[in-house]
């Protein structure tokens, strides 16, 4: 029977969780504070700990820092106040997982099973000697979505190594913010973070920009230049939009990743560099590899730790959270909040520009809004398509038919009568569309 230590200052929650653990055939031990939990860890057999983040006195992160000196056990962090910062910190300090309250029973059981399976491996590892975590900048990493929480967990897990990280996501999803969070959470946080936009530098200047040059290497080289790799020495180099880099330059980057040394343009001396590479792109790199536009060996070399950022339209729960955050960031003498209509307009928008577009919309609203309440007209977003007026009386079949007829008519109008394209947009076969056209008298 495994012994599970629950460290939480809420007695009712402790009792409920203990009852669940007992139902699973596990023995539950309870402690109401970090200090009490550490005492039980010293005096009793404990195989795994479930620790609350927020407690009076020392918090759950303090438990994570101090527990390994007593005994190496998997720790599952729980919190009702999850953020990018505390998720990254918890994972960097060695938490097995980071769950939000209330925890679904199925999720808890799944996590416990994984943690218990890892007990033997964890028992053989030396105690974690890591010092206090570098706090992540919570002001930049704002999200309540499960998809982004998985990203935060990976940042925390990757922070303790120098492995190359590849951040993938559409334009505007916050790839550089993630790279900066990874740098801040790492042991390189006190050293430089250097960001390079590979799409913005002409190919003929890229080598000099990255590797530097010696005086006289080419026309206009009137002095030595160190280059971004040497500027980032000891820290992190962020290669943004690496998918736009030319093939010859890709070959040189691959060599640097393999050899950890560079040669400045026009120079004869090889120079060692100590940098962690974080690359990012919005391009579909597997397709680029298949088409010969991106080196396959570099693709494999970059994606040691891949991080995929979901577009904003796939995490609509973050839209209002981020919008209110950006309004607070705008500051000003008058605190502003969203009206119900403005919130509805934000949720109805598809956000092709992702978080960057949302930030711009809220900056615009803060400028145009003269009062305390942000209205739809301050956002500068197009009105959503009108929803057909469906009567709430009558049968469900009648209401569905009215909606179908309206959507088919709109699809035909939007495609200038192209039935094949209208069927594709509606998710119908052409035969299905023809039958419905006849049914609703639209043929």
Image (spheres, grey):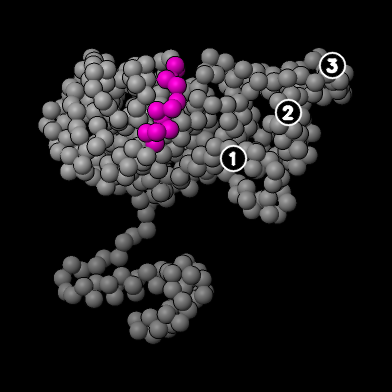
Instruction: Please name the residue that numbered disc 2 is placed on.
Output: 259
Segment tinted magenta in the rendering: 118-130
Q: Position of residue 158 (x, y in %)?
A: 50, 30
Q: Is residue 306 left or right of residue 31?
A: right
Q: Residue at x 43, y 33 (%)?
A: 121
Distance between mark 1 and mark 3 Cα atoms? 36 Å
Q: Position of residue 188 (x, y in %)?
A: 55, 19
Q: Is residue 195 visible?
A: no
Q: Residue at x 48, y 79 (%)?
A: 430
Q: Is residue 128 magenta?
A: yes
Instruction: Indicate which disc, 2 or 3, sits on the residue closer to the N terminus.
Output: 3
Rendered position, 294 above or below 268: below
Q: Residue at x 45, y 45 (%)?
A: 310
Image quadrant where residue 230 sits: top right
Q: Nearer the viewer, residue 15 or 302?
A: 15
Q: Is residue 415 visible?
A: yes
Circle number at residue 215: 3
At mark 2, the secondary structure is helix
Q: Position of residue 216 (x, y in %)?
A: 87, 18
Q: Nearer the viewer, residue 77 or 246?
A: 77
Q: Is residue 378 left or right of residue 170?
A: left
Instruction: Indicate which disc, 2 or 1, sits on the residue closer to the N terminus.
Output: 2
Instruction: Please name the residue that numbered disc 1 is placed on.
Output: 303
Distance between mark 2 and mark 1 Cα atoms? 17 Å
Please rate how many residues cluster around mark 1, counting C-alpha atoms within 10 Å: few if below 14, some from 14 to 19, many from 20.
Answer: some
Rendered position, 366 above or below 233: below
Q: Overall secondary structure of the magenta stretch?
A: loop
């Amino acid at each position: 029977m495994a012994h599970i230590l629950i460290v939480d200052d809420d007695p009712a929650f402790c009792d409920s969780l203990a009852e669940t653990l007992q139902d699973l055939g596990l023995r539950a031990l309870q402690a109401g504070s970090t200090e009490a939990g550490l005492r039980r860890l010293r005096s009793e057999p404990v195989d795994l700990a479930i620790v609350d983040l927020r407690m009076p006195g020392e918090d759950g992160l303090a438990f994570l820092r101090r527990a390994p000196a007593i005994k190496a056990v998997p720790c599952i962090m729980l919190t009702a106040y999850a953020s990018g910062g505390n998720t990254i910190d918890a994972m960097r300090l060695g938490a097995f997982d980071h769950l939000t309250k209330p925890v679904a029973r199925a999720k808890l059981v799944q996590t416990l099973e994984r943690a218990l399976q890892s007990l033997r491996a964890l028992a053989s590892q030396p105690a974690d000697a890591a010092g206090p975590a570098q706090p992540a900048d919570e002001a930049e990493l704002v999200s309540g979505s499960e998809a982004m929480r998985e990203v935060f967990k990976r940042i925390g897990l990757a922070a303790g190594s120098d492995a190359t990280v590849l951040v993938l996501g559409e334009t505007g999803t916050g790839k550089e913010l993630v790279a900066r969070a990874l740098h801040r959470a790492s042991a390189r946080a006190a050293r430089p973070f250097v960001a390079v936009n590979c799409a913005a530098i002409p190919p003929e200047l890229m080598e000099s920009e990255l590797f530097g040059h010696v005086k006289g290497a080419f026309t206009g080289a009137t002095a030595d230049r160190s280059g971004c790799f040497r500027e980032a020495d000891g820290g992190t180099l962020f290669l943004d939009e690496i998918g736009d880099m030319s093939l010859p330059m890709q070959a040189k980057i691959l060599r640097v990743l393999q050899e950890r040394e560079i040669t400045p343009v026009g120079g004869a001396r090889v120079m060692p560099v100590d940098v962690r590479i974080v690359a990012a792109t919005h391009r579909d790199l597997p397709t680029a590899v298949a088409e010969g536009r991106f080196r396959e060996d570099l693709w494999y070399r970059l994606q040691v730790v891949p991080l995929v950022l979901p577009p904003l339209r796939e995490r609509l729960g973050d839209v209002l959270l981020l919008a209110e955050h950006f309004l607070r960031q705008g500051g000003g003498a008058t605190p502003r909040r969203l009206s119900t209509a403005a919130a509805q307009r934000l949720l109805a928008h598809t956000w092709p520009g992702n978080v960057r577009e949302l930030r711009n919309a809220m900056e615009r609203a803060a400028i145009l809004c003269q009062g305390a309440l942000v209205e739809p007209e301050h956002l500068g977003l197009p009105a959503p398509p009108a929803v057909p007026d469906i009567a709430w009386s009558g049968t469900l079949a009648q209401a569905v038919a009215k909606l179908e007829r309206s959507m088919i008519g709109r699809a035909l109008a939007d495609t200038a009568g192209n039935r094949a394209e209208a069927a594709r947009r509606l998710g119908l076969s052409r035969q299905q569309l023809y039958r419905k056209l006849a049914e609703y008298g639209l043929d």
